[in-house]
Amino acid sequence: MRIPVLICFLVLAATSRAPAQPATYTHADTLRGSNGPGRAWWDAQFYDLHVRVNPADSSIRGWNGITYQVLAPARDMQIDLQVPLDVDSIVQEGRHLTYRRDGNAFFVALATRPRVGDVETVTVYYHGRPRVATNPPWTGGFTWAHDSLGNRWVATTDEGLGASVYWPLKDYLADEPDSQRIAIAVPDSMVDVSNGRLRSTTPNGDGTTTYEWFVANPVNSYDVAVNAGSYAHYSDTLDGEAGKLSLDFWPLAYHVDAARRQWRQAVPMLQCFEHWFGPYPWYADGYKLVEAPHLGMEHQSAVAYGNRFTNGYLGRDLSRTGLGLNWDYIIVHESAHEWWGNSISVQDHADMWVHEGFAMYAEGLYTECQLGKTAGAAYLIGVRGRISNRAPIVPAYGVNAEGSGDMYPKGANMLHAIRQIIGDDAKWRAILRGLNATFRHQTVTGQQVEDYISREAGIDLSKVYAQYLTTTQIPEFDYRVEGGMLAYRWTNVVAGFDMPLRVNVPGLGDRVLHPTEAWQTLPVPSATAEQLVVDENYYVTARNVGGERP
Ligand SMILES: [Zn+2]
C-alpha cells in the first residue's frame, strides 16, 4: 500500500493500482525521501511521544521528545510534521528555539553548536486536525469511525505517507529510534492499543485516560499506531523458538467470540514462520492482533486487523487457486512483515520489494506449512495473475518513491525461482533464517539482501535480480529441435542473463539447463523432444521457434 496506493498489501485488482511513477520529483519529495543536511548529522535514539486524541472535534495535541546523538557538526535540524498540523514550540534545555517551515518540514536553529558524540533532546509541541484517511490503509491518516454499536473507533495508518502525518519526527526510513514511548490520551470510554507493551493506564481526571505503551526495540515510524475503541482483551502464550512469547488479542468487545475462533490462526502462523525465518523478532514487545476499522496493516508487534474474521483476502483468494481460502490473509501477510519489513527494514521506499515480495512469498510458505510443498508452489504460481509488468519494481531512490505493485506477486515469484535455482530446501531455509539473523532489527538496502542471498547460495544471482526488479520483461526460453538436437537460449532478458532452468525433455527426463543469450545445443534421442515442458515454478515463458530462423 503505498504509493499512493499499495503499501502493505495488495490492492485487489491490478488495474486499480497507481500508474507508473512520475518522471520528476518535487523539492518536498527530496526533503522527505533523502538523507538531507538537516538529517544526516543526527541519529534518532528515542522518541517520547505523547498525543491527546479528541474524537469530538477530530483534533490532536501533543509533544514528542526527540533524543538523538550528534554524528557530525551542524546547525539546522530537520523535523517533519505534515500540514495541516502546526508546531506550537520547539524547546531544548528550557530554551525556545527558532524555526522556519518548508511545507511538511521544519528547520530548527539549534541554540548551541552540537558536539559530535553528544546525546541531546529536543521537544516539539504541536496540535491540529490531522489529515483524514480517505482510503485506509492505502491512503492513510486518521480514521475517525464508529463501530456498529455507535461507539467511537479511531485508528491511524500512514505507510508511505509517513508518520509525520500525525507526529513530529525524522520521517526517514533509514533512521529508526532504538526504542519509543507512545502515550495516547483518549476519552475514558475508549481503550487505546498501540505498539509494544502497556506500561500504565492513568486516568487524567478530565474525562480522559492515558495509555502508555513502550516499544523496547527499533521501530519503523509508520508502524507506530493509535487504535482506540471499545476493545476486549484476552491473551495466550506460545512456546516459541526464543522462549515464551506473549500473545495479546484486542477485538472489539462484541467480536470477542469471532476473534477467539478466527485469531487462533496466529499460533500455527507463528510456528510456521519461526521454522522458516527464525524466532519472532519481538519477544520483548510481544505479539498482538488489534481489530481496526480498515483492512489491516503490519503495525509492529500490534498487527492491525480488519479482515471480517473470515479466511482469504476479504473472503477472496488472491491466487485464484482456492488455496488462499484456507487461511486468513491479514493474519498471515501482515504478521510476515514482522520479519520482512519490521525487523529487516529497507532504508528507501524504492527497495520496498524486500518487505512486500517476502511477505507475499511467506503466504506461499504458510500454504506449504499447512498443505504441503506442491500447494505452496501452486499458490505462488497462482498469484502471477496479479502481475501487470507495466513498470519496474524498483523506481528512483532518494525521493520516497515506491515501485510497482508487482513488488508483491512478482517479488514473491522471483524468490520462488531463486529457491528452484538453489535447488536445496535446507539451504534455502538457512538463507531465509540467516537474513533474519544477520539483519535483525536493522535497516538495509535491497542490494545488501541481494548480495547476502547470492553469497550464501554460492550463486551470482545479480542478473536474476536485474531482470525481475528493474525491467518489465518476462524471460523467454526459446527452443527448437532439429536433427536430433535441442537448441535453446534466453531472449527478452537483460544482458548476460544466465538463470538456470529446469526442463523436462521427453527421452531425457528432468534436466537443469544453463541457457544464455547465445544458442546452445543438446543431443536429444526422442522424436518428441520438442514437447518439452519447462518447470512452471520459474516465472518465464517458453516458445518453440522451430520453423523460425534465428
Ligand atoms: Zn504487505
Image (spheres, rainbow, N blue to C red):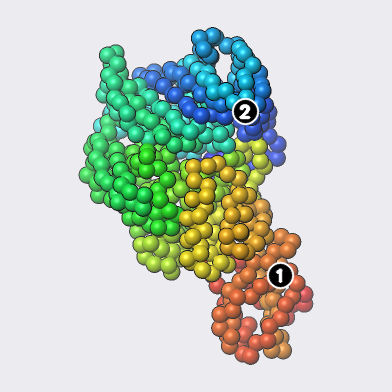
Q: Which residue is mark 2?
A: 71
| Circle 1 or circle 2, nearest the eye | 2
Mark 1 crowd level (few <14, some 14–19, many ≥20, 10 Å Cα):
some
Q: Position of residue 192 (x, y in %)?
A: 33, 29
- Disc with the residue nearer the chain's start (1 vs 2): 2
Residue 252 vertical placement versus 59 (above, below): below
Q: Quadrant of the C terminus?
A: bottom right
Is any atom of residue 373 visible in this view? yes
Q: Which residue is mark 1?
A: 516
Residue nearest the observer in this picture, 541 or 124: 124
Q: Position of residue 184 (x, y in %)?
A: 37, 24
Q: Position of residue 537 (x, y in %)?
A: 53, 67
| Direction from residue 326 to residue 74 in the image, left or right | right
Residue 93 vertical placement versus 35 (above, below): above
> Quarter of the image holding residue 400?
top right
The amino acid marked with disc number 1 is Thr
| Direction from residue 239 to residue 160 in the image, left or right | right
The amino acid marked with disc number 2 is Leu
Q: Position of residue 296 (x, y in %)?
A: 41, 42
Mark 1 and mark 2: Cα distance apart in space: 48 Å
SS for callout 2: loop
The residue depicted at 51 percent of the width and 29 percent of the height is 45
Q: Is mark 1 within 8 Å of ligand 1?
A: no
